[in-house]
Image: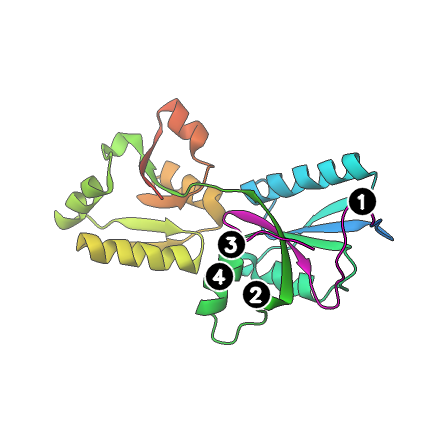
Amino acid sequence: MKFTMFKGAVAALALAGATTATAEDWTPEGPVSVMIAFQAGGGADTMGRLLAQELAERNGWEVIPENVTGRGGAAMAEALLEQPADGLAIGITVSEAFTYNIQAARNPSYSLDDFTYLSTITGSQMGIIARADRGWSTLADVAAAAQAGEDISFGAMSQKLADAAYVIGNALDVEFTTVMVKGGRGGLNGVVAEDIDIAWAAGVQTPGIKAGDIVNLVSA
């Protein structure tokens, strides 16, 4: 089975004992489970459910999406690894689960070689957001506020992004107070409610930006 390396959301198939096949000569012997690594309503969940629908409509298969959430995609990867390598379980996750998470874990429970990578589904652009009425338009504005004595809280939905916030703070010669949030929606809600000053987000902020309530300080 050919595959592409990835960025953004990816699909992965449990590998052990898998044989080469194509859509033309393979028919599933039961329902295909699409295991989505993130909670309902987010970008990965939306893409996973659209993929499940397309697979079902195009091939006539029974395809069942399910959310297997936790630990930045690690919970889904572990659950996928426990499934038989018969093509009946596909995982939808983001690149972080197979790159940063493995390197950061003291005793990782899976490795890159445990899975076959099927396809990149989409690339998403990460941003750092703030309320528009704060008057900030760039990270330099935030740094100036911090250097003037303001305590700036920074919402992050994963340890990788918390580490990135730390690196950004060092580069700007400021110290942020990192607040762990549940998904990009959690960061957005914190910013809107003024519980958090700035936060990482990956698309959920779009309606707020269009409405003029939220500003992207930087995209990455």
Q: Which of pointers 3 and 1 indicates the residue nearer the eye?
A: 1
Q: Is residue 66 above or below residue 166?
A: above
Decide if residue 209 is on the left or right side of residue 42.
left
Q: Quadrant of residue 77?
A: bottom right
Q: Which amino acid, by three-letter code, is at mark 2?
A: Leu
Q: Position of residue 217 (x, y in %)?
A: 29, 38
Q: Which residue is mark 4?
A: 99
Do residues under tags 3 and 4 come within 8 Å of each other at their CB atoms? yes
For the residue pair 152 and 50, the one nearer the viewer reads as 50
Q: Secondary structure at mark 1?
A: loop
Q: Residue furthest top?
A: 211
Q: Secondary structure at mark 2?
A: helix
Q: Which residue is mark 3?
A: 95
In magenta, the rendered stretch is: 1-25
Q: Which residue is mark 2?
A: 112
Q: Position of residue 204 (x, y in %)?
A: 47, 37
